[in-house]
Image (cartoon, rainbow, N blue to C red):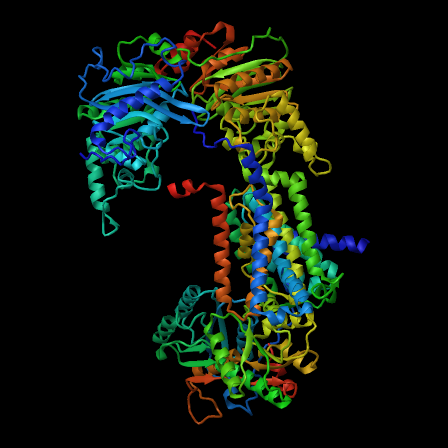
Amino acid sequence: MSALSRRRILFGGAAVGAGALLTACTSNEPETNAQVNTNTGTSANPNAAAGQKVIIGFSAPAADHGWIAAITTNAKAQAAVYPDVEFRAVESGTDAAAQRAAIATLIAQKPTVIVMLPADGKELDSTGLEAMKAGIPVINLDRAFPSRAAYRLQIKGDNYGMGLAAGHYIGEQLKAKGVTNPIIGEIPGIDSLELTQERTQGFNTALAEYGFKVANRRPAEFTADSGQAAATALLQALPKMDALWNHDDDQGIGVLAAIKQTNRSEFFMVGGAGSKLAIDAITKDDSVLKATVTYSPSMASSAISLARLIGQGKGMSDLVELQVPQEITLASETITKDNAAKYAKLGF
Amino acid sequence: MTTQTAPPEATTKHERRKIDDGVLRNLGLVGVLVLLIVVGIITKPDLYSDPTWVKNNFLTILQQASAIGVVTVGMTFVIIGGGIDLSVGAIIALAGVWATTLATQSYGAGGMIFTALIVGIAVGLVNGVLISYGKLVPFIATLAMLVAARGLAAQISGKQTQISANSTINSLASERLLGIPLLVWILALVVAAGWVLLNRTTFGRRTVAVGGNPEAARLAGINVKRHHMLLYALSGLCCGIAAIMLTSQATSAQAAMANLYELDAIAAAIIGGTLLSGGRGTIVGALFGVLVFSTITNLFAINNLSTEVQNMVKGAIIVAAVLIQQFRYRSFTQLFKR
Amino acid sequence: MTIPSRDGRTPADPPHQPTSEHASPVEATDQAAESAVATPPSGAAAAGVALRTPQETPPPPDDNGGGDGPGDVVLRLTDVVKTFPGVRALDGVQLEVRAGEVHCLLGQNGAGKSTLIKVLAGVHHADSGEVNFLGESFAPATPQAAMRAGIATIYQELDLVDDLSVAENAFLGHEDSRFGFSRRRAAAQKTRGILARLGHGEIPPRTMVRDLPAAGKQIVSMARALSHEARLIVMDEPSAVLAHDEVENLFRIIRELTAQGIAVIYISHRMEEIREIGDRVTVLKDGRTTAANLPARSTPTRELVSKMTGRSIEYVFPPRRPPLQLDPLLVVDGLSRAGEFADASLTVAPGEIVGIAGLVGSGRSELLETIFGARRADAGTVTLDGQRITSVGKAVSKGMGMAPEERKSQALLLDEPVYKNMTLASFSGFAKAGFTDTAGERRAAEKTADALELRPRDVNRPIRTLSGGNQQKVVVGRWLLENTKLLLLDEPTRGVDVGARAELYQVIHDLAERGVGVLLVSSEVPEVLGLADRVLVMREGRIIREAPASELDEDTVLDLVMAGSLTTESILEGEPA
């Protein structure tokens, strides 16, 4: 009894003194599992040797999605690995206007290189140009600028490729099982985004190769609760299903919850992005989730490594070229139970 | 002499109108629900021919309406009381995130539920104090809270999706009692409690009074400010309950959860016959409003129609409901004169 | 000068009449005669007031009229009637205004002046009767139409937009524009011209109206009137918001306007202003013209006051009771609120009816609300039964109740049934453990409805379907349920018809018989004198006279209530309260 009343006081106080106890709560968040390239032995990698000091300015929108959170975490962690890198992140708000203002202050500080994940590639095109004109090489993460002159290097994931990978996996599996006229469901993220449309196009293209098509698609909003709602609706609409592709592992938490709540298991599911939770679930193989196609935030770690090289005027040591190339598109890989162990460190 | 506008009406007319007010509006919404289901039967006869599926479908519609339904009950009180609460979605997110921190989860299901309710009430109280005693307009105060509470939720969660590891909480969404999902029972309880509170208690009477004519309520000795504050706390409490329900459904919480719930809750209250200027509204009507939305979502899902069209239909239904309200309270001549 | 075309809304111009050009004047006279017959005989003639009958048209210009030499008739009202549900606001008004004159309109509150102004301004439409402006039948559909036709109205509460500039206000509603863009420079130029014409070229046209003092705002209102080329300007108590020297300036402007041939209808309660600026006076009483075209300078005040008070409503007051001699229940000591009232002290004993006579703006309603705790006093105290009253909650819990001035906006839940309105202050008392007892409330409300002779007696009806008098009974009944010891009544018979008034008077008397103290405010002097045991007269925020009702008569009180600001000091010195 006394323990209970003590708890009450504790929680009551916590709720009232919201700000004061905030730090106590945040300190309990799980340890971050950043994706870091630790290949910094100078003997194996001559580029790892400390060079001239590089100041990397960094900007990413303050979104509350796990993937963007991982982008920031990865960039910061990768920068910390290099003793010759100084990392300067700016608070960039949630929209393009706020980010434009944030980057303007960054440019004024004259960093050696700027790494940015634009809130919107088109809207921040002019900001990229401005930085380049000021003599600061810009590394664009994930969301392309229309002007070639607005960036020195672009490193991005492959949304279309994700769809292709998911479609091929599902097609192969169903073909192997001998299903001729399968019922396939799809849960995309926010449907109005270009990236969602690219993923869906890739998915449909791949499925068409097997003569399959999507029976029903219910979009969610990249959040777990919207994923649960979309999945519940989809499961109700398709009383029997053979396969399901969910575009995003974050909303997939809700999708998996909905599947569990409705006691459905007659189908298999493919995820998207490659979160740690999803990779763990695939490894354990205790749910319908059998695979996920990657769109890894590890690109932020790579971007920092490449920014350092650009800042120091070095090339990638495995390539002949003396400079870092201009475009790098990550391949979307398919993580299954067989290769999950290899990708575990890339889960976010 | 002051201008007098209310013409005396015949007793029979007002008797008829009373029936209109209480039952006809709800009957109209029931009619819409039946229509939606009939459209479902016509378009998907194969699904509707399976009785198990039909039963499951109704329970799914109810279950998917449960969290937003609870929020709408609180919202209905606030609107009848002459206010508006734009921060409900944000309060759910904050309460959900706070209830799923590792620290809170270590106290078990009871601790998580308690935290969500307390956070909901506390944020609601802050809204209430700002509006009643800080004299902020409800729209502004709760808009600010919308932004701030989501911000705080993002801060607490570190923008991560926080997984609920508590099996008791998670099972709320899958367990059934007498064949009916627990979440639906919770909704039923909240609706029943809300109905009693509005129609059978002094709190409800005060709510109608302060919303219908705050000056008259004040001059009759009712503490209008305190009551407004309590209404926002009540809305916050409903958000706390909804936060637990949503967390159990999604087995997680995050700062972006319950996105745009404020709009759905306000819209449901309005098509349920709640007057946005306050003083009039019903809990049952609000419940029907929520069910109409939930049924539309279901109908569009089983027909694999895009959510864009679904949103357009929702918008049209809101406009139609409000237009019908206006036609009923103004004569045609008045409508065309102005 | 633009003269508006008729828009076909004139009642005298029925659409089925093929030769309307010829037939309408005949129709008009017929209708006017009909409506004159239709008015109850208890009207002006029965009151024994000299009044031209509508058949004698046009009324000959008064020989003793303004010395400025009146020009042509610009406005003529014949038998204008306007009714609102339960109220006959205008009941046969005659009015004649000539070009270049200042025509004063006199009457008590409720005499119909405001309604008349609104008919001229296009806010209301006359039910019957003829309004003739510049030789044409005048029935503007909207205030804008009235302005375009040449009648501008300057309200007491100036209807300016604070956040627009002087020029934007002057041309509000008829802005100069080119391709949809307002021509601000041109408007400013024109406004400058108009302001110069008003002798106020020093007001910059680009200033925000918010930043102007009250007198400056009034000048902007007049500039707006002139921007419309107004031929007739109606001014509703323009001096009420002005300081003494500003009034002089106002008069100078009015004289300049009339010299340009513009007619002015001037409304004021201040007799010496009427003497100074007015040419002719028309007196209204209960919606009727009781005297027309009296010379403003030479008509004795007595005569004007008697025209205003000439009895036409039968006030039926219950027989007076012997006054009770008890210790005071309510003691108000030195109560003040800046800009509203100052140093008000009064007492009310159990079973006593105390009446406050005063005009709108005299601070009477504000005083009542402050006593009730609804406004915070700057200084002074209110005690009921020896307990300090500082808030409405306290006032109600200690046994004070109030029926406020604006019934609809301050007292009623219009959509709710009668019984819920009746129990608005007491439903918590009926409740058990927070649960309302609607059956008990209904029973109690029915009992009260019986005692108040509420009609209809059905307590489940929405209160909006009741007449004004019965709504007021519900508001009073609310406090009967609360075991109220002191009842504050602010204009209890406003918007109440004659029959219901008598019943309300009886209710108030019955309450006093039961030992309830009553503090009553009314702008109808006979009501205060007929109901109250003791009378306080308020003017410009101060109680200037206190006496037993039996020692006062209507004319004396009206003189006190209306006396101009110049004589305030002399009254205070001559007859200390």
In the image: residue B79, left or right of residue C152: right
Can you tell which quarter of the image residue C12 is in? top left
- The location of residue A320, given as percent across then percent down, is 44, 94
Along the line of sight, which residue is nearer the eye, C64 or C548? C64
Along the line of sight, which residue is nearer the eye, A347 or C230? C230
Vertical relation: A241 (above or below) C529: below
- The location of residue C544, given as percent across then percent down, is 45, 13
Vertical relation: A224 (above or below) A6: below
Can you tell which quarter of the image residue B249 is in? bottom right
Vertical relation: A109 (above or below) B139: below
Along the line of sight, which residue is nearer the eye, A43 or C513? C513
In the image: residue B316, left or right of residue C270: right
Query: Quadrant where the C terminus of chain A lies?
Result: bottom right
- The location of residue A164, given as percent across then percent down, is 52, 84
Q: Can I make out residue A28 in this image? A: no
Q: Can I make out residue B297 in this image? A: yes
